[in-house]
Amino acid sequence: MKTLAISSVSALLAAGALSTTAQAQQPMSIQPYIGGDAMFWELNPDGGPSAESTGLRLRGGVQFNDYFAVEGHLGTGGSDTNRGVEFELDHVVGAYAKGILPLGDQFRLYGLAGVSEMEGSFTVGPFEGSERETDFSYGAGAEFDLTPNLAVGADYMRYLDQDDSTFDAASVGLTYRF
Protein backbone atom coordinates (compact mmCIF):
# COMPACT_ATOMS: atom_id res chain seq x y z
CA MET A 1 0.00 0.00 0.00
CA LYS A 2 2.78 2.42 0.91
CA THR A 3 4.61 1.63 -2.36
CA LEU A 4 1.43 2.17 -4.37
CA ALA A 5 0.80 5.54 -2.70
CA ILE A 6 4.38 6.70 -3.27
CA SER A 7 4.25 5.53 -6.91
CA SER A 8 0.95 7.36 -7.49
CA VAL A 9 2.25 10.60 -5.98
CA SER A 10 5.47 10.32 -8.01
CA ALA A 11 3.49 9.80 -11.23
CA LEU A 12 1.34 12.86 -10.52
CA LEU A 13 4.42 14.98 -9.78
CA ALA A 14 6.13 13.77 -12.96
CA ALA A 15 3.00 14.56 -15.00
CA GLY A 16 3.02 18.06 -13.54
CA ALA A 17 6.68 18.56 -14.43
CA LEU A 18 6.17 17.26 -18.00
CA SER A 19 3.10 19.43 -18.54
CA THR A 20 5.09 22.47 -17.40
CA THR A 21 7.63 21.78 -20.15
CA ALA A 22 4.90 21.17 -22.74
CA GLN A 23 3.18 24.46 -21.89
CA ALA A 24 6.35 26.56 -21.86
CA GLN A 25 5.03 28.62 -24.79
CA GLN A 26 1.95 29.73 -22.84
CA PRO A 27 2.25 32.44 -20.18
CA MET A 28 2.13 31.05 -16.65
CA SER A 29 -0.43 32.43 -14.26
CA ILE A 30 0.94 32.10 -10.73
CA GLN A 31 -1.92 31.91 -8.27
CA PRO A 32 -1.50 32.02 -4.46
CA TYR A 33 -4.12 30.34 -2.25
CA ILE A 34 -5.01 29.76 1.39
CA GLY A 35 -7.26 27.16 2.98
CA GLY A 36 -8.68 25.98 6.28
CA ASP A 37 -9.70 22.44 7.19
CA ALA A 38 -11.13 20.24 9.88
CA MET A 39 -8.40 17.64 10.42
CA PHE A 40 -9.36 14.18 11.72
CA TRP A 41 -6.06 12.68 12.88
CA GLU A 42 -4.93 9.31 14.21
CA LEU A 43 -1.67 8.31 15.90
CA ASN A 44 -0.85 4.59 15.88
CA PRO A 45 2.26 3.69 17.93
CA ASP A 46 3.45 0.08 17.71
CA GLY A 47 2.83 -1.68 21.00
CA GLY A 48 0.97 1.25 22.54
CA PRO A 49 -2.56 2.61 22.56
CA SER A 50 -3.66 4.62 19.54
CA ALA A 51 -5.04 8.14 19.78
CA GLU A 52 -7.46 9.96 17.50
CA SER A 53 -9.08 13.36 17.59
CA THR A 54 -10.07 16.40 15.56
CA GLY A 55 -7.93 19.49 15.05
CA LEU A 56 -7.63 22.40 12.66
CA ARG A 57 -5.29 22.80 9.72
CA LEU A 58 -4.26 25.87 7.73
CA ARG A 59 -2.85 25.47 4.23
CA GLY A 60 -1.21 27.95 1.93
CA GLY A 61 0.51 27.67 -1.37
CA VAL A 62 1.27 28.90 -4.83
CA GLN A 63 -0.07 27.19 -7.95
CA PHE A 64 2.31 27.74 -10.89
CA ASN A 65 0.11 26.22 -13.61
CA ASP A 66 -2.77 23.75 -13.98
CA TYR A 67 -0.51 20.84 -12.96
CA PHE A 68 1.92 21.93 -10.26
CA ALA A 69 1.93 23.84 -6.95
CA VAL A 70 3.90 24.05 -3.71
CA GLU A 71 1.98 23.94 -0.44
CA GLY A 72 2.56 24.29 3.30
CA HIS A 73 0.47 22.89 6.18
CA LEU A 74 0.14 23.92 9.81
CA GLY A 75 -2.17 21.79 11.94
CA THR A 76 -2.88 21.72 15.66
CA GLY A 77 -5.43 20.68 18.24
CA GLY A 78 -7.11 17.65 19.64
CA SER A 79 -6.30 15.15 22.36
CA ASP A 80 -7.30 11.61 23.27
CA THR A 81 -6.96 9.33 26.28
CA ASN A 82 -6.73 5.60 25.67
CA ARG A 83 -5.79 2.94 28.25
CA GLY A 84 -4.44 5.55 30.67
CA VAL A 85 -2.29 7.34 28.09
CA GLU A 86 -3.25 10.86 27.08
CA PHE A 87 -1.87 12.28 23.83
CA GLU A 88 -2.26 15.89 22.70
CA LEU A 89 -1.23 17.15 19.24
CA ASP A 90 0.92 20.26 19.65
CA HIS A 91 1.50 20.78 15.92
CA VAL A 92 2.12 19.25 12.54
CA VAL A 93 3.90 21.44 10.00
CA GLY A 94 5.15 20.58 6.52
CA ALA A 95 6.12 21.64 3.00
CA TYR A 96 5.04 19.71 -0.11
CA ALA A 97 5.22 19.54 -3.87
CA LYS A 98 1.70 19.20 -5.30
CA GLY A 99 1.01 17.41 -8.58
CA ILE A 100 -2.46 18.26 -9.96
CA LEU A 101 -4.60 16.30 -12.41
CA PRO A 102 -7.49 18.44 -13.75
CA LEU A 103 -10.58 16.37 -14.61
CA GLY A 104 -12.60 19.27 -16.02
CA ASP A 105 -12.93 22.97 -15.44
CA GLN A 106 -14.08 22.63 -11.82
CA PHE A 107 -12.76 19.29 -10.51
CA ARG A 108 -9.21 18.08 -9.92
CA LEU A 109 -7.30 15.32 -8.15
CA TYR A 110 -3.91 15.93 -6.58
CA GLY A 111 -1.00 14.23 -4.88
CA LEU A 112 1.31 15.71 -2.26
CA ALA A 113 4.86 14.70 -1.35
CA GLY A 114 7.25 16.44 1.01
CA VAL A 115 8.43 16.55 4.60
CA SER A 116 6.55 17.09 7.88
CA GLU A 117 7.34 17.61 11.53
CA MET A 118 4.88 16.40 14.16
CA GLU A 119 5.11 17.24 17.87
CA GLY A 120 2.85 15.93 20.58
CA SER A 121 2.65 15.75 24.36
CA PHE A 122 1.76 12.65 26.34
CA THR A 123 0.85 11.85 29.91
CA VAL A 124 1.07 8.39 31.46
CA GLY A 125 -0.06 8.57 35.07
CA PRO A 126 2.28 11.03 36.81
CA PHE A 127 4.76 11.05 33.89
CA GLU A 128 4.69 13.71 31.18
CA GLY A 129 6.76 14.09 28.05
CA SER A 130 6.78 15.21 24.49
CA GLU A 131 7.80 13.70 21.19
CA ARG A 132 8.95 15.47 18.02
CA GLU A 133 9.47 13.55 14.78
CA THR A 134 10.30 14.61 11.21
CA ASP A 135 9.59 12.34 8.23
CA PHE A 136 8.80 12.09 4.53
CA SER A 137 5.07 12.69 4.01
CA TYR A 138 2.62 11.98 1.21
CA GLY A 139 -1.06 12.14 0.48
CA ALA A 140 -3.80 12.57 -2.10
CA GLY A 141 -7.00 14.52 -2.41
CA ALA A 142 -9.66 16.10 -4.57
CA GLU A 143 -10.99 19.62 -4.99
CA PHE A 144 -14.18 21.06 -6.53
CA ASP A 145 -14.66 24.73 -7.42
CA LEU A 146 -17.78 26.33 -5.92
CA THR A 147 -16.94 29.74 -7.47
CA PRO A 148 -13.95 30.92 -9.53
CA ASN A 149 -12.04 31.72 -6.29
CA LEU A 150 -13.55 29.27 -3.75
CA ALA A 151 -13.19 25.48 -3.69
CA VAL A 152 -14.18 22.68 -1.34
CA GLY A 153 -11.81 19.75 -0.94
CA ALA A 154 -10.78 16.69 0.99
CA ASP A 155 -7.50 14.84 1.36
CA TYR A 156 -5.76 12.07 3.25
CA MET A 157 -2.18 12.55 4.45
CA ARG A 158 0.39 10.19 5.94
CA TYR A 159 2.38 12.76 7.92
CA LEU A 160 4.58 10.29 9.80
CA ASP A 161 5.53 6.72 8.88
CA GLN A 162 8.28 5.38 11.08
CA ASP A 163 9.12 1.91 12.35
CA ASP A 164 7.46 2.55 15.70
CA SER A 165 4.46 4.75 14.76
CA THR A 166 2.30 6.34 12.07
CA PHE A 167 0.42 9.64 12.10
CA ASP A 168 -2.37 10.08 9.52
CA ALA A 169 -5.04 12.71 8.94
CA ALA A 170 -8.12 13.05 6.77
CA SER A 171 -9.13 16.67 6.20
CA VAL A 172 -12.12 18.49 4.74
CA GLY A 173 -12.24 22.23 4.13
CA LEU A 174 -12.31 25.29 1.89
CA THR A 175 -9.65 26.93 -0.28
CA TYR A 176 -9.62 30.56 -1.42
CA ARG A 177 -7.54 31.49 -4.50
CA PHE A 178 -6.38 35.11 -4.87
Image: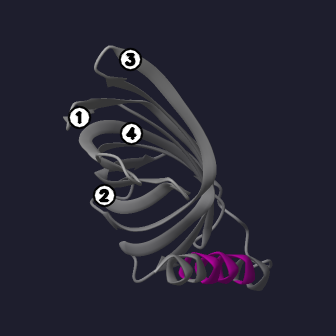
Assign the magenta stretch its main secondary structure. Answer: helix
Left/right of residue 127 with respect to residue 34 in the rendered view: left
Q: What residue did someone put label 2 on?
A: 147
Relative to 46, residue 8 above or below: below
Pointer 1 or 2: first along the chain: 1
Depth-wise, is mark 3 or mark 2 nearer the camera?
3
- Residue linked to disc 1: 80
* Disc 4 + disc 1, Cβ < 8 Å: no
The residue under label 3 is 127
Q: Are marks 4 and 3 in contact (CB under 8 Å)?
A: no
Instruction: State the residue at coordinates (51%, 76%).
Output: 2
Q: Secondary structure at mark 2?
A: loop
Question: In front: mark 3 or mark 1?
Answer: 3
Q: What's the colour scheme?
A: one colour
Residue 113 visible to the viewer: yes
Residue 115 vs residue 164, the one in the foreground: 164
CA distance separating discs 4 and 3: 29 Å
Q: Secondary structure at mark 4?
A: strand
Dot 4 corresponds to which residue?
Answer: 57
Give the amino acid at mark 3. Answer: Phe
Q: Nearer the viewer, residue 29 or 6?
A: 6
